[in-house]
Image (tube, rainbow, N blue to C red):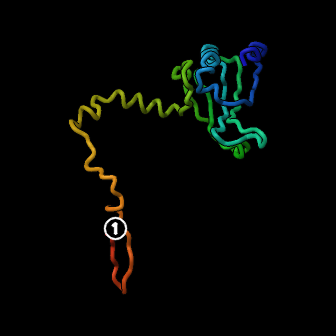
């Protein structure tokens, strides 16, 4: 991908369909760093765990690179069967990416987290003790079943 990027001119672009593991694994750290430094990724179509090819069980994406300077990456997590249907791109700012795992999230998620961080109080400030009450694990005792007996309704647990 790096070499292909170097070969295109400033008006060109290059696209790849390939496994998307480089977005999240350690071995993809170098290419993610290259992409961020050069703001080279224009868009990514991410097919998640949906199979694109009948004879290859690999998790796939389509990545488009160009040499324009940009502040965001457009992406869409989509089912391959819907690729010809109109859709709206999500985007993520380059400033929210680094060479670590690229878990692509809509920019609205980051904006909401930033807004929450600006709030003067946290849950810890407001509630002194948060705990779970009794958790028995005895679902047989607390799960009731309903039966009808001659116009009457009777509820019982399995232990009854």
Q: Picture quarter containing residue 99?
A: top right
Q: Secondary structure at mark 1?
A: loop
Residue 103 drawn above or below residue 67: below
Q: Quadrant of residue 128?
A: top left
Residue lying at the far left of the rendered structure = 128
Residue 42: which quarter of the image? Answer: top right
Percent position (x, y) of residue 156? 33, 71
Residue at 53% over, 33% down:
106
State the residue position of label 1: 157
Position of residue 153 in the picture relative to residue 17 (left or right): left
Q: Position of residue 85 (x, y in %)?
A: 70, 45
Kindly identify the residue that appears in the image at 57 percent across and 26 percent down. 102
Q: Which residue is at the far front?
A: 159
Please state the horizontal and vertical placement of residue 88, each as a whole percent of the image.
62, 39
Residue located 67% across and 36% down the image: 59
For the C terminus, the quadrant is: bottom left
In which quadrant of the rendered image does the N terminus lie?
top right
């Amino acid at each position: 991908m790096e070499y292909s990027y170097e070969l295109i001119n400033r008006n060109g672009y290059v696209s790849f369909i390939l496994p998307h593991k480089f977005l999240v694994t350690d071995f993809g750290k170098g290419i993610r760093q290259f992409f961020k430094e050069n703001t080279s990724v224009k868009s990514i179509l991410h097919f998640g765990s949906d199979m694109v090819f009948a004879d290859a069980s690999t998790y796939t994406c389509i990545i488009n690179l160009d040499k324009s300077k940009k502040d965001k990456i457009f992406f869409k997590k989509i089912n391959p069967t819907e690729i010809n249907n109109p859709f709206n791109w999500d985007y993520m700012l380059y400033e929210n990416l680094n060479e670590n795992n690229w878990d692509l999230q809509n920019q609205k998620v980051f904006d909401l987290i930033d807004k929450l961080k600006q709030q003067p109080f946290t849950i810890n400030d407001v509630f002194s003790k948060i705990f779970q009450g009794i958790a028995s694990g005895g679902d047989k005792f607390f799960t009731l079943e309903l039966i009808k007996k001659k116009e009457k309704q009777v509820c019982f647990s399995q232990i009854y």
